[in-house]
Image (cartoon, rainbow, N blue to C red):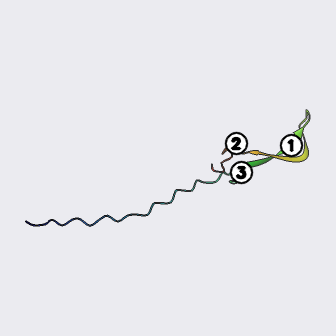
Amino acid sequence: MSTEKKPPPRRRRSPKPAPVPPSCGTCDGTGETTTAVRVGRKHREIGATQTGLCLSCLGTGTG
């Protein structure tokens, strides 16, 4: 009886790193944007700013 040779075991590969999604161009990856505060009927700016969620990426920072 002849013995058959086993094939060599396969090499295990290291897992590939997950691709990094590009950062949002509107908020630069922070997820927040700043806008000037406007008041009155003529929408005059009062010199203050407010922050809010970025509408392009909805606060995730990736776009």
The tally of labels here is 3
Foreground residue among 1 and 49: 1
Q: Secondary structure at mark 3?
A: loop
Residue at image location 68% in from the left, 52% down from the top = 25
Residue under label 3: 27
Instruction: Answer few, some or many: residues within 10 Å of disc 1's Cα (few below 14, many 20 plus, some between 14 and 19).
Output: some
Quick check: 47 left or right of 10?
right
Quarter of the image containing the N terminus?
A: bottom left
CA distance separating discs 2 and 1: 17 Å
Sequence-first disc among 3 and 1: 3
Residue type at numbered disc 1? Val
Q: Is residue 4 above or below residue 19?
A: below
Give the distance between the C-alpha atoms of the residues marked 3 and 1, in whole angstroms. Answer: 18 Å
Rounded to the nearest angstrom, the CA distance separating label 3 from label 2 is 9 Å
Q: Tell me which residue sits at (23%, 65%) in the image.
A: 7
On the picture, is 21 further left or further right than 9?
right
- Percent position of residue 32, x then y: 74, 49
Q: Residue at point 91% right, 35% down?
A: 42
Q: Residue at x 40, y 63 (%)?
A: 13
Q: Residues within 10 Å of mark 2 (few under 14, many from 20)?
A: few
The residue sitting at the left extreme is 1
Circle 3: is it few (<14), some (14-19), or many (20+) Cα within 10 Å? many
**Residue 18 higher or lower than 36, as above or below:** below
| Residue position for label 2 | 55
What percent of the width, then of the height, locates residue 17?
A: 50, 60
First in sequence: mark 2 or mark 1?
A: 1
Q: Dot 1 corresponds to which residue?
A: 37
Do the CB atoms of the residues marked 2 and 1 lie less than 8 Å apart?
A: no
> Disc 3 marks which amino acid?
Cys
Residue 59: image x %, image y %?
Answer: 69, 46
